[in-house]
Image (cartoon, rainbow, N blue to C red):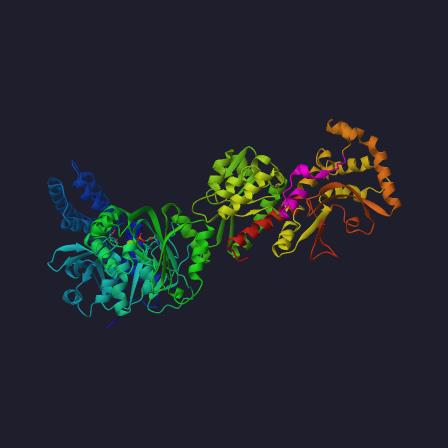
Amino acid sequence: MDKWIVHKFGGSSVADADCFRRVADIVEGAPEARLESSPNPREAVVLSACRGVTDSLLNLVAHAAQPNGDFLAGVDALHARHAALAQALVSPAAAAEYQLALERDLRDIGGMLQTVRLIRAAPDSVRDVIAGYGEIWSTRLFTVYLRERGRIAGEVRWIDARQVVVVDWGPLGPAVQWSLSEQKLRGLVAADFVGRLIVTGFIAATLDGIQTTLGRNGSDFSGSIFGALLGASEIQIWTDVDGVLSADPRLVPNAQVIDQLSYNEAMELAYFGAKVIHPQTMEPAVARDIPIYIRNTFAPEKRGTLICANPTSALKVKGITTIDPVALVNLEGAGMIGVPGTAHRLFGALRDAGISVILISQGSSEHSICFAIPEAQATRAEAAVRSAFDTELREGQIQSVDVGRDLSILAVVGDGMAGAHGVAAQVFDSLARAAVNVRAIAQGASERNISVVVDGKSGAKALRAVHAGFYLSPNTLSIGLIGPGTVGRVLLAQMKSQLERLRGLNVDLRVRAIATSKRMLLAENEIDLSQWAKLLAEKGESLDIDRFARHVQADYIPHTVIIDCTASADVAGYYRDWLARGLHVVTPNKKANSGPLPYFRAIQEARRAAGTHYLYEATVGAGLPIIQTLRDLRETGDEVTSIEGIFSGTLAYLFNVYDGSEPFSSIVQAAKQKGYTEPDPRDDLSGMDVARKLIILAREMGLTLELADVAVEGLVPAALRDCSSEEFMRRLPEFDAEMAATLKLAREQQQVLRYVGRVDATGKATVRLTRLDARHAFANIALTDNVVRFATRRYCDNPLIVQGPGAGPEVTAGGVFSDLLRLSAYLGANI
Ligand code: ADP
Ligand code: ASP
Ligand code: MG
């Protein structure tokens, strides 16, 4: 005889009339839904109650047991919903007949609820009977509907599972009485049956013939029980997602479908909260080696996830789940060391109190045992443990019983972890990088599951970070950018052009907030970088920098960075706080590093304490690798004796062009017109910008200098320091002769003029106009180049020189961008 196939459709698959149509198509063997080419002659179809109906029924019971509990409105709503479904799906005559039966059932339910109300309590047996009606109503209707469609070759027969499945409820849940159930099924379905059996999920009978259920979400279990009873060749569980996903899609939006799982993996995932399958589903299938497919009713053309004995998937880690809320109970005391039987007593007491333990961890010193339980059972568990160890607690052999609440268990599951090294390291590394604290750890000897207990509020973040760590989803960085001006604007454009490519490399940069000095734009997912300016203008709100930072640091995204593209000391004033709170900072803003030394140190301390990163390559020489070079030298043990350089593109330009043929003031004038200088050229000529850069490098060398320690010889004549910018430009020619004399002196000795900053290891720092030999490295640079010369113990005869364009929005933004990518790499991206 032909093989059986068993389908199970969950509540979400039979939510409304359209859903019933979809299910009927699949059951009739629609080609896109079939895994094989020809239709199968006999199949069983297990249905759940329509979505939400079991919940409604259980609510009715709970409600009726309350003082003044009224249930009539709830009963009416169930009537209306099912009657409407019938009218939409079947002929008027069939609908009327269906409705009659429905009303009979609802009267029975009303009677039972009335009793519940009178006795103010709902016995389990009553709750079970009422809860099971949803499956009866969905299957009865579907049976009639499928018959009327008339496309099934053979019979469409309704099966009431209470007449087939017999279970005995024990401490481990419902135990199926297999031979009895098989016998009952044989009595109902002949060996040569052809067609479709429409079977009620969720419900069964006890040995005494009383109706019971298989527990919440038990229809999956029904599916595999019927698979086993019928000796099916496969079981297909249909739901509303594409299969078993690597994480709960509501928490990790980019979770992926797992193509294949072993029974054990599926069991662990189900047990640890992957709600898509009921943990008990596996047992009957495993015993008979029946493959299970998890498939999407709403996308039947997809193959879904195959769960079988020997999957052929190369992934080490298959899925990551969380359960919450849980509580952690910790029993601690020297009296337990080396005393056999403590665990036995502990777990015996919990068993007697009917508490199921989710996770256990005991250190090898036996000084403490801790275990996790559903939080709802915490109070009872604590009482049970305290009373079991009453004597030891009084006599001090056990010091304490602590209960931690509002926790979450994260479980990482995969057969491939067995014998593989580095998986646990990867889990803990991801958690550490996301600043998630681990409260307890357990790994079964099967090595199929690593479980960690974390604070409930970091549960989602932990899940995303670990998921990202295994490349199941990209490393996501939540970015807030402040100051979309000259540099910030270009940076956004550069990022936009690279987003796709970087996502291909598992680096997911999400600009989720942009702020100007007055306004801010916040986006939950990410800001569309092709129209950020428009969005900021239309949807921006007034700036609240604290809210800005809190928004960027979303709990569910593993990493956060703020990019400060302003030149503001106020914004720099937030760095310490941000870094201490777990936000990384990337910036070309010189204010923090060249400001007062105590604040600079506080930033470094905050960064070290919180394990965050603070990157500022673009503060000196724009995109040129100056700070990184200096770090590399120092970190590899070289000693820097001096650093000198031309750190201002503007001043480099002025002295490259100034050859005496034109007065110095005209060159400044022309440069100002071309936009090479600041609006007030004194900002360049004062030398303070160069001094700030020098301080940044000096501190990077380990020196403790303040800006005031730099001897700055500026180029602004004392008489012109305080006048207006216009007057300055007008009167600058008065000083041309002085500059011409300096140039002449240099020329006579084959020298050139360059504006140079210099700091040495003794802490001497100067910024001034210097005469250099015409063959000096600084004498021959291109127009606005920056050049930096490191003299070190290793680079002594011939110094190390970094040279190139050191100003301009493109190269500065490029420098910030490379810091951002460096940050991603530090955080685990494999770029
Ligand atoms: P049904 O009504 O079909 O029984 P359920 O609501 O019981 O469906 O289970 C399916 C839901 O399980 C999905 O919609 C999804 O939101 C959730 N879910 C949780 N974890 C996972 C996971 N790891 N893979 C797939 N779905 C999951
Ligand atoms: N209808 C039952 C429930 O909601 C069984 C199921 O749908 O699996 O728990
Ligand atoms: Mg379900």
Q: Position of residue 403 (x, y in %)?
A: 30, 47
Residue 451, compared with residue 813, is above or below; it is below
Q: Residue furthest bottom?
A: 1
Task: Give the left or right position of residue 35, taking residue 683 as reference.
Answer: left
Q: Position of residue 465 (x, y in %)?
A: 44, 52
Does residue 687 appear in this view? yes
Residue 205, compared with residue 381, is above or below; it is below
Query: Residue 721 or 202: which is nearer the viewer?
Result: 721
Q: Is residue 708 magenta?
A: yes
The part of the image, by quadrant, that contains residue 662 is: top right
Query: Residue 418 or 59: which is nearer the viewer?
Result: 418
Q: Which residues are magenta?
A: 694-715
Query: Residue 744 or 63: which is nearer the viewer?
Result: 744
Q: Position of residue 817 (x, y in %)?
A: 59, 49
- Count every numbered label the image shows and give the total: 0
Task: Give the left or right position of residue 547, taking residue 300 as reference.
Answer: right
Query: Residue 622 or 606: which is nearer the viewer?
Result: 606
* Quarter of the N terminus within the rendering: bottom left
Q: Residue furthest right?
A: 748
Task: Give the left or right position of residue 423, taking residue 58 as reference.
Answer: right
Q: Is residue 627 magenta?
A: no
Q: Which quadrant of the figure shows ligand 3?
A: bottom left
